[in-house]
């Protein structure tokens, strides 16, 4: 399918970005190149801010496809080079509307073997580079009350990649802070985590990273993070498409947020959103028990403690890239981390056992509210799981387990409500 056909499939008109100028750093290959190609197909004039000679061929290939593209050899980590980029860009295409901070270096070196100079280089390219380009191109955006900055970010943790991950998490902070700074000046700032994408960069990385994760490079490169990409990573062209769709269609929806590529492609209708037709388990409505014995309450608390242990073990079985996402999702939805939940339940268990009704009374409203949030988390687990698998049997089993867990929490909410006075 041609780039044009793919864009039409997403409901994007070929002139959607006509008259706009875009700078894409590190666009000589990989996601940056594909993003530049897709933005050019939408009519944007492209500046490829790339250090390596690959920038020349990338620009030529976009031109050959009918786009407007120019390579300005740039080292994004170098202030003078970025100043020259800003100057030449202005002369060539005028003020910039779209800035994609994409250039990286990503060495896989254990922290104890990492030279200070290498650490500095990673931070300089991946983080200082984004700062320098933002500072260079932002004034024109603010002056014209419009523009979008997309900063490419990544996952939460990888062994042997502390410098890269630190730079990317720094970039999340930069994006969020900048979003607040320019909030009312018409400029959108988005941190974009494209997903696991098949690029020359990740292929290089996989050779040294996969063994650290206990995998072969082949297994690493065939991880499934969305059912549409079974046993393969997202093709770089799809990540480019997602970037272009985000810029052309979704900037009104995001500002200062971390957005992921699968979500964008689902919103575009390019990937089918999994689990839409999946029945969510609804726990049986359970009224407040008439009389609750102390052992019954303690048993419910212990069962919930076991559920949280099971949940932790389930997180540990996920692919390494999905683990932080799952843990973060748990914490943000349930309001607490697994560890804090464990402490909460231990304290509750002790108070109930000791008959500390005064403290129970005082803590009850907060506790019930927190437990309700936890129940909502388990209620949504089947839908979330459907993002990763379409195996009907697995989903059915997950639905059954989630409903049981939700039921335990509702029972506990109801029983603790009876405790305050007589425990
Ligand atoms: N590939 C993935 O799975 C993945 C996952 C999460 C995030 N990302 C992010 O997406 C972006 C692109 O990743 P990719 O895999 O396509 O990368 P890649 O390594 O394939 O390409 C990076 C490009 O940056 C260029 N570059 C390096 N140093 C530069 C400098 N000083 N100045 C200008 N250009 C320079 C390189 O020459 C190269 O063309 C990165 O920001 C990365 O963190 C990628």
Image: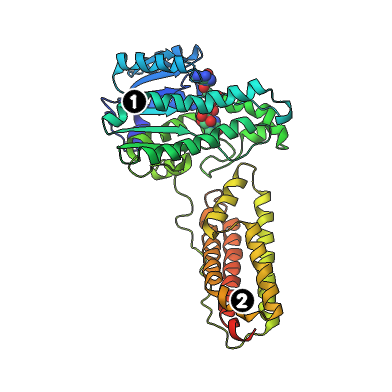
Q: Residues within 10 Å of mark 2 (few under 14, many from 20)?
A: few
Marks 2 and 1 close (CB-CB < 8 Å): no
Residue 271 is labelled as: none
Is residue 238 in view?
A: no
Callout 2: helix, strand or loop?
A: helix
Residue 41 is labelled as: 1
Q: Quadrant of residue 218?
A: top right
Q: Residue at x 58, y 58 (%)?
A: 336
Q: Residue at x 30, y 31 (%)?
A: 142
As drawn, 292 above or below 40: below
Residue 399, percent across and down? 56, 62
Q: What residue sits right under mark 2 in the picture?
A: 359
Q: Residues within 10 Å of mark 1 (few under 14, many from 20)?
A: many
Query: Closest to the observer: 5 or 209?
Result: 209
Residue 216, percent across and down? 70, 33
Q: Quadrant of residue 217?
A: top right
Name the colour scheme. Answer: rainbow
As drawn, 79 above or below 220: above
Q: Residue at x 38, y 38 (%)?
A: 181
Callout 1: helix, strand or loop?
A: helix
Is residue 13 in view?
A: yes
Q: Residue at x 57, y 84 (%)?
A: 289
**Front disc: 2 or 1:** 2
Residue 65, percent across and down? 36, 18
* Label located before the other in sequence (2 or 1): 1
52 sits left or right of 314 in the view? left
Q: Quadrant of residue 144?
A: top left
| Quarter of the figure with the C terminus | bottom right
Distance of label 2 from label 1 (alpha carbons): 64 Å
Query: Closest to the observer: 413 or 204?
Result: 413
Residue 301, percent across and down? 66, 72
Query: Closest to the observer: 293 or 224?
Result: 293
């Amino acid at each position: 399918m041609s780039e044009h056909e793919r864009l039409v499939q997403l409901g994007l008109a070929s002139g959607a970005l006509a008259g706009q100028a875009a700078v894409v750093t590190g666009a000589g290959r990989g996601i940056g190149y594909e993003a530049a190609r897709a933005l050019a197909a939408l009519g944007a004039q492209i500046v490829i801010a790339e250090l390596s000679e690959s920038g020349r061929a990338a620009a030529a290939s976009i031109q050959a496809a009918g786009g407007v593209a120019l390579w300005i050899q740039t080292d994004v980590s170098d202030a003078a080079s970025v100043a020259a980029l800003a100057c030449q860009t202005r002369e060539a295409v005028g003020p910039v509307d779209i800035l994609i901070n994409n250039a990286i270096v990503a060495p896989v070196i254990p922290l104890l073997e990492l030279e200070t100079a290498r650490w500095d280089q990673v931070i300089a390219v991946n983080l200082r580079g984004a700062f320098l380009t933002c500072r260079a191109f932002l004034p024109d955006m603010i002056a014209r009350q419009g523009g979008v900055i997309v900063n490419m970010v990544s996952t939460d943790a990888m062994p042997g990649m502390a410098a890269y991950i630190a730079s990317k998490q720094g970039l999340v902070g930069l994006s969020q802070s900048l979003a607040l700074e320019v909030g009312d000046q018409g400029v959108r700032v988005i941190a974009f985590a494209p997903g696991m994408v098949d690029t020359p960069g990740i292929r290089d990385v996989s050779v040294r990273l996969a063994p650290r994760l206990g995998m072969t490079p082949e297994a690493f490169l065939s991880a499934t993070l969305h059912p549409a990409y079974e046993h393969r990573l997202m093709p770089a062209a799809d990540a480019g498409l997602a970037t272009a769709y985000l810029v052309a269609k979704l900037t009104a929806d995001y500002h200062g947020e971390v957005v992921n590529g699968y979500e964008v492609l689902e919103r575009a209708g390019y990937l089918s959103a999994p689990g839409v037709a999946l029945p969510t388990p609804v726990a049986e409505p359970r009224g407040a028990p008439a009389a609750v014995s102390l052992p019954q309450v303690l048993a419910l608390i212990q069962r919930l403690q076991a559920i949280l242990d099971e949940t932790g073990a389930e997180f540990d079985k996920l692919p390494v890239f999905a683990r932080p996402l799952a843990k973060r999702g748990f914490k943000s939805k349930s309001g607490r981390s697994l560890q804090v939940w464990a402490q909460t339940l231990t304290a509750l268990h002790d108070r109930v056992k000791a008959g500390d009704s005064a403290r129970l009374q005082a803590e009850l409203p907060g506790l019930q509210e927190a437990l309700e949030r936890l129940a909502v988390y388990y209620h949504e687990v089947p839908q979330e799981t459907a993002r990763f698998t379409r195996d009907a049997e697995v989903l059915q089993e997950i639905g059954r387990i989630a409903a049981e867990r939700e039921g335990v929490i509702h029972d506990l909410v109801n029983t603790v409500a009876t405790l305050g006075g007589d425990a």
